Amino acid sequence: MEGVSSITFISFVYFTLCLLLGFFLLSVKSKNRISNILFASFLFLTAIDISAYFHNLFFKGFSNFVMAKSLLAYLQMPILYFYVLSVCYSDFKLKPKHLFHCIPFVVGNLILVNRFYTKDASYIANLWKDFNGIWELVFIHFSIHLQFIFYIVLIFIVLNKYKKIYYQNFSDTATKTYDWLFQFTLVSAIAHSFVIIKSILKYVDGNFSFPIAQIVVSIIGLSIVIWLVFKALKYPELFKSVDSKIEVFSTDETKCTEDTEHLVKLDNFMKKQKPYLNSSLTLRNLAQEIKINSRELSILINQNLNKHFFDFINEYRINEAKNILKNPSKKEYTILEVLYDVGFNSKSSFNTAFKKHTGATPSEYRKQFYN
């Protein structure tokens, strides 16, 4: 009984936080309104899903409403997938073709028509006595888990493409979009593995393992929502999207081979004009400045220098930072002033990039010259 009361309390808090965060996202003014709507929808569906742990307080016995409600879980991952697309790609729009993602939800409901939706509560109650023997429920239960795995893979594919496009076209080091979405997807995948274990235990040992597993899963889910609330409040403008039409350039292309003239022109421009000091410099901006096609510039950097645009720009920024850090006249500059002066806009990104190129942190590098 204690376990039941615990799961009811935890799941109700989980349910409430999902609703509050969902309404918060809908109330926030954002340039990418569709992302907020999609993520709020995902949270609302999550709240509906978690309500299964306490809906018996409001709905007595078995009803078709409760059964239909549980099938909304089929819509959670498609909506999360659309959310990731909308955050990563600024040109994302919902289209009629996206309705195909609702097919599992429709099929799931059709499967339940014969043995559930057309029967009365007493008939369903008798069926429920042999829960493990109801093939329709077993099928739906595990097909939802398979669907989750399918969409998690799709999301990781989208994130991988986004990362490639970003690194090849942008120099902004504040890549919080990728970090946030990757972290959330990874945490969700790990958390759902516990849900799968819980589902297995549900069919193996319904008297002991299932209630304990429910509590563990609810605590994990609650922790994730609290983390989401923290992220939403700390980083209200978290995301930077790219255009999905931007092509990912392959380093295998041979159209632009060793091009000494372009490389010299590029290096001279970088050293004299210092465009890297602009924290929002993009591949397109730089290509326009040196009067070269964006595609050719990307291939030039990728093939001849074996670098992404992101790393190429950061190398100049780090060299500029090294000059400042060892300059006696700028000895009083703080690390924060240095990173902003050279084009970075994040201390953590600056420290990571600096250590990658020099093997030391900015502070450690400076101490080499001023003991």
Image (tube, rainbow, N blue to C red):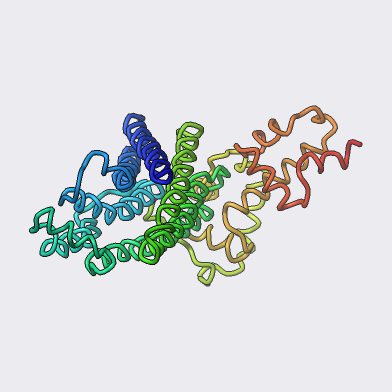
Q: Could you tell me residue 371's position as x and y percent? A: 91, 36
Horizontally, is 11 left or right of 58 in the view? right
Quadrant housing residue 256:
bottom right
Q: Quadrant of residue 275?
A: top right
Q: Residue furthest front?
A: 1
Identity of the residue furthest to the top in this view = 332
The picture places residue 7, in percent across and down from the top left corner, at 40, 44
Instruction: State the residue at coordinates (54%, 43%).
Output: 281
* Residue in view at x 25 percent, y 69 percent: 133
Of residues 133 and 282, the one nearer the viewer is: 133
Towards the viewer: 13 or 39: 13
- Which of the pair 259/19 is nearer the observer? 19
For the question of whether residue 158 can be seen, the reply is no
Q: Position of residue 263 (x, y in %)?
A: 63, 58
Q: Residue at x 22, y 60 (%)?
A: 128
The location of residue 24, given as percent across then percent down, is: 36, 31
User: Which image quadrant: the N terminus?
Assistant: top left
